[in-house]
Amino acid sequence: MFSSSNPMFGEKMYQDPTLVPSDIIGSHTMTVQGAINKTLMLFGILLATSLIGFMYPHPFLMIGGAIGGLIVVIISVFKKDKSPILAPIYAALEGFFVGGISFMYASMLNGIILQAVTLTFALLFLMLFIYKTGIIKVTSKFRMGVIMATGAIFVVYMLSWVLGMFGINIPFLHEGGTMGILISLGIIAIASMNLLLDFDNFDKGEEHQMPKYMEWFFAMGLIITLVWLYLEILRLLSKFSSRN
C-alpha cells in the first residue's frame, strides 16, 4: 500500500490516442502550472484529514483510509478522466491513514514527525533542483529502471504483509540493525527517484497537450510519492532510534 503510483506512468501512456484528442487546445489541455495548483490543493486536503486522523486516532479511520486510498488509485488508473473527482477523494482518505500512522510513531518517539516532515520536503526540493538542472535526466531507460525497482519494492511489501499473517518475517526489512537501515536508505533513494518521474510527467503532459483532467491525475501521483517517502523516512528514523 505504500508503493508509488508511478509504474502507471510509463512511456506508452504518452502515445495513447485516447488521452490526446486532436481537437483539444489551449485552456482544455494540461499545463505545468495547472498541475502544480492541483498538487497544492490535494496537499491541503491531505493535511486537513491528516490532522483529524492525528487528533482522533482510530483503527477504522487509519485502515479504512489506507484501503480506500488504494482502491481509488486503482480505479483512477483505468478511469483517468474521473481524476478530478478521484484525486481529492484519495487525498482525503490517505490523510486519515497518514494521520493515524503519524500518531503511532509520535506516541513512541518524541519529535519524529517534525524530523520526518522536514526531511521529506528537503528531499522534494533537492530532487526538484536535480531535475531542473539536468543533473539526472529522465530518459526512457531511467524511467523503466525506476518503475521496475518500485514494482520490486511493492512486491516485497506485499509478500511481507502476506507472510506476516502467518508469523513469518522477511529478514532485515523491519529490523533496526545495519542491514535494516541500509535497506531503508535504498528504498528512500528509489522513492526519491520517483519524484523525478513525477516532475517529468508534469512537463511531458504539457508538451503532449494532454487533457486538462490529467493535471489531477499527475498531481495525485506526486502526492502518492510524497506519502510513500514520508512513511519510509518515519520507518528509517525509528530504526535509528532503536539503535540508541
Image (cartoon, rainbow, N blue to C red):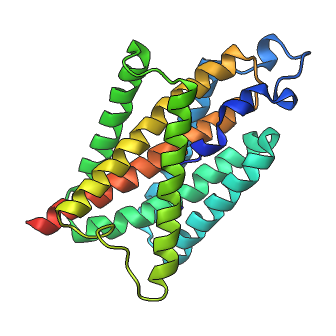
Q: Quadrant of residue 239?
A: bottom left
Q: Do we see residue 18 in this rendering?
A: yes
In the image, is 91 to the left or to the right of 83? left
Query: Looking at the image, which residue sits at the far front?
Result: 141
Out of 151 and 233, give the one closest to the viewer: 151
Which quarter of the rendered picture does the N terminus lie within?
bottom right
Q: Quadrant of the C terminus?
A: bottom left
Q: Is residue 3 visible?
A: no
Of 202 and 166, the residue lying toward us: 166
Query: For this rendering, which residue is in front, 147 or 129?
Result: 147
Locate residue 190: give its quadrant. top left
Q: Position of residue 114 (x, y in %)?
A: 26, 49
x then y, percent, for residue 84: 74, 39
Q: Is residue 12 left or right of residue 157?
A: right
Residue at horizontal 86 percent and vertical 17 percent from the top: 24
Does residue 110 sit above or below 119 in this rendering?
Answer: below
Number of dots carrying numbers: 0
Report x, y in % for residue 145.
50, 38
